[in-house]
Amino acid sequence: MNWDDPTDESAAERLVGASADREDQAVEAALRPKDLDEFIGQEKVREQLDLVLRAARARGATADHVLLSGAPGLGKTTLSMIIAAEMEAPIRITSGPAIQHAGDLAAILSSLQEGEVLFLDEIHRMSRPAEEMLYMAMEDYRVDVIVGKGPGATAIPLELPPFTLVGATTRAGLLPPPLRDRFGFTAHMEFYEPAELERVIHRSAHLLDVEIGAEGAAEIAGRSRGTPRIANRLLRRVRDYAQVKADGVITRDIAKAALAVYEVDDRGLDRLDRAVLEALLKLFGGGPVGLSTLAVAVGEERETVEEVAEPFLVREGLLARTPRGRVATPAAWAHFGLTRPGPSAGGNGQQDLFGA
């Protein structure tokens, strides 16, 4: 299980999960900005990418290969489409898991048009043979197609038209250096600030024909985990609540009431996040406690706790991973309004028999 994997069912079912389900994909298609000027946030990335694309257009050449890294839901797919639009080129979209053999990649590369943009999502999950074929394709615009097997096999060189590869990854560290070095431009997507998410929400509300106040947008933004995809998903759920329970206008009170129904608290924690923290705080005195024990306490699989819940809790400074086990931070105690046990309490919340 991989918390960054769009096919991870546990992550996809969460309202605050960053993976995209079918509804998200359909709505995002309508909400995606069409050019860099319309794209909100990621100021440094936008500025740098704008220079790369303008220079390529001025030379009349295809743009350098681009690698975009960062957590799911931050806009990597959107930027790939903007790159194609800015270069006035068609775009081909595929993903690393879909390319399991070198022949799969050869078929895609051999059908590309000159200047076309190939977007390869989750590029770190591509098979090794395909990865090695991609090295030559990116550098020399050529692939060797192997015909036959064994000693009689023959490599037939196939020339490719110049193209731009846009690779996206949630785990840049898993990319081998030879592949990473072949990208002419590399950008890391950062989590959004609340003010940027408010702009995203206002823009999406306008496109969805939803009336929303500034305070309502701020309330949703504050619970969106720094991720536009989550902000748009929460906006749609609050819109539903406002249409059914109110007059359709999203205010701060309406947003609070709606997100309370969906169990998303004021820091963006959902049921699973709170279950993990409450077990750690109330059953184990804040830890340290082993991952397997913690998973049993919340009735979830070990992988679900580690890969679905923990990344956000660690990033928010509510939980720490230590060699001895998971430990709640002072911020976690404060969030739940609990008092941290004194030094006489053991790590599992029980009194130390020896008074240490």
Image (cartoon, grey):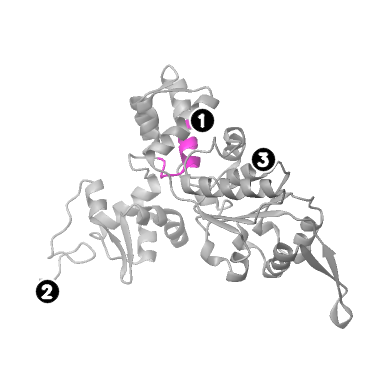
Which callout, 2 or 3, points at the residue further toward the start of the chain? 3
Real-space Cα separation, disc 2 to disc 3, in angstroms: 70 Å
Q: Which residues are magenta?
A: 224-235
Q: Amino acid at mark 2?
A: Phe
In the image, residue 151 sits, relative to residue 215, either above or below, namely below
Local packing at callout 2 (Cα closer than 10 Å; few below 14, some 14-19, many 20+) is: few
Q: Position of residue 141 (x, y in %)?
A: 76, 62
Q: Position of residue 125 (x, y in %)?
A: 62, 62
Residue 73 shows in this picture: no
Q: Is residue 282 left or right of residue 353?
A: right
Q: Nearer the viewer, mark 2 or mark 3?
A: 3
Q: Nearer the viewer, mark 1 or mark 3?
A: 3
Kindly indicate the quadrant of the structure image that contains residue 287.
bottom left
In the image, residue 180 sits, relative to residue 272, either above or below, namely below
Which numbered tag is attached to residue 204? 1
Q: Position of residue 320 (x, y in %)?
A: 32, 61
Q: Position of residue 184 (x, y in %)?
A: 61, 59
Q: Amino acid at mark 3?
A: Ala
